[in-house]
Image: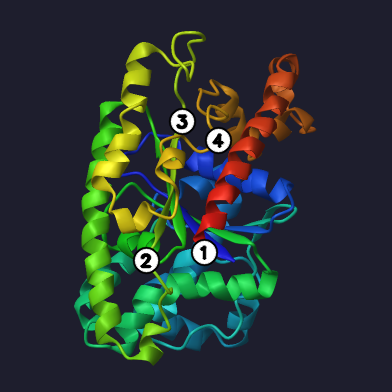
Amino acid sequence: MKTISVFNNKGGVGKTTLTYHMAHALSSMGKKVLIFDLDPQCNITALSVPQDWLLKVWESEDGYIQDFKSTRERAGDSFTKMNRSTRTVHYLLMPTQEGTAELDVLPPPVLLAPNLHLIPGRLTMHLYEDKISSRWSDVYQGDPLAIRTITRIRELADQYAEIYDYDYVIMDTSPSLGALNKVVISTTDGFLIPCAPDMFSLYGIRNLGSALGMWQKQFNTIYQLLSDEKRSQFPERFVSLLGFTIYNAKKYTGVSPWDLAKAHYNYAMQIPQEIISYIPSEVRNHVPENTMAHPIGGTSIMHTHNTLTGMSQKYHLPMWDVPGYSNLGDDYSTVTANKSVYEGTYEKYEAFSYDVLSRIATLG
């Protein structure tokens, strides 16, 4: 199993839409995939499941989020029943947050499609981030609870993969460079950067590069200080960059090699150099420089999907499955008139996902 995170220190680059459709494409290609929603805004969860269902899940957990140990003790046998249904990622992390006993049995994930599951997010994830921050310095001393706090997300991914035989666990993240993302990104096997062709994405790469350099030094120091037994709770090596994408750009045929408007193309062409200049070489050297210079999947998903993403969000389906939905209502005429456009998006994400897999293969 490989863990993959999707990150940019810039919002509005289509990260959630990209992650959602990449996960669906990989599952359609026969890969078993789990999505962890680690973004406190819960965007990929909102895209994946109905809000009424999610609200019931959140409400059933409220007592546990406020005081996990006491609520578990009062619940008695109903606690066992609680864990037979899907729970959010913050619920799964609450025993670590409080420093109490972990769950005996992991709750089942949500089934989104054959081979594709989701651990939903929760708006309270900032509370776990606070614990990461407050316990971080204790990791250097080898404190067991501090180490558990830092490594628990990765450990949960491993445990779920062992039960469900996942090929990939995809971590959806926020645009923040805070403590939560430091842990998530640093302890995944690989990550990719979705970019808009604009100045903000260039500066986002610079910010990320500075953060990665600092995080790498911190983790290397931790690894040197810990005993072999405690070191084994961490991944074998620091995260590796798989590459970047250009996403949600306006298509202008014949204007540039990537069919982008001149202004977009000028920014897009600067992204590879920004990566080489600012992302630490140890993080990216496993991918040849001439490969890293090209967007993952080439132009396959580079251009805007216009209103197709809105329909995807409305029906909690990947774009290519929307025309086959049996209850489109007032959207039926609009969707069926553009059926080939909707269904054609699958080939684009398939091509993108094959390139992702080829780059994951370089991780060893």
Foreground mark, 1 or 4, reads 4
**Percent from the top left, x then y, of residue 53?**
60, 53
Q: Earlier in the sequence, mark 4 or mark 3?
A: 3
Tell me which amino acid carries mark 4: Gly
* Contact flag, marks 1 and 4 (Cβ < 8 Å): no
Q: Nearer the viewer, residue 84 or 96?
A: 96
Q: CA distance from mark 1 to mark 3?
A: 29 Å
- Provide the secondary structure element on which disc 2 rests: loop
Q: Residue at x 51, y 64 (%)?
A: 88
The residue under label 3 is 247
Q: For mark 3, does the 10 Å Cα neighbourhood hold few (<14), some (14 to 19), or many (20 or more) residues?
A: many
Tell me which amino acid carries mark 2: Phe
Q: Nearer the viewer, residue 103 or 74?
A: 103
Foreground mark, 4 or 3, reads 4
Tell me which amino acid carries mark 3: Tyr
Q: Earlier in the sequence, mark 2 or mark 4?
A: 2
The residue under label 1 is 88
Q: For mark 4, does the 10 Å Cα neighbourhood hold few (<14), some (14 to 19), or many (20 or more) residues?
A: many
* Contact flag, marks 1 and 2 (Cβ < 8 Å): no
Q: Quadrant of residue 321?
A: top right
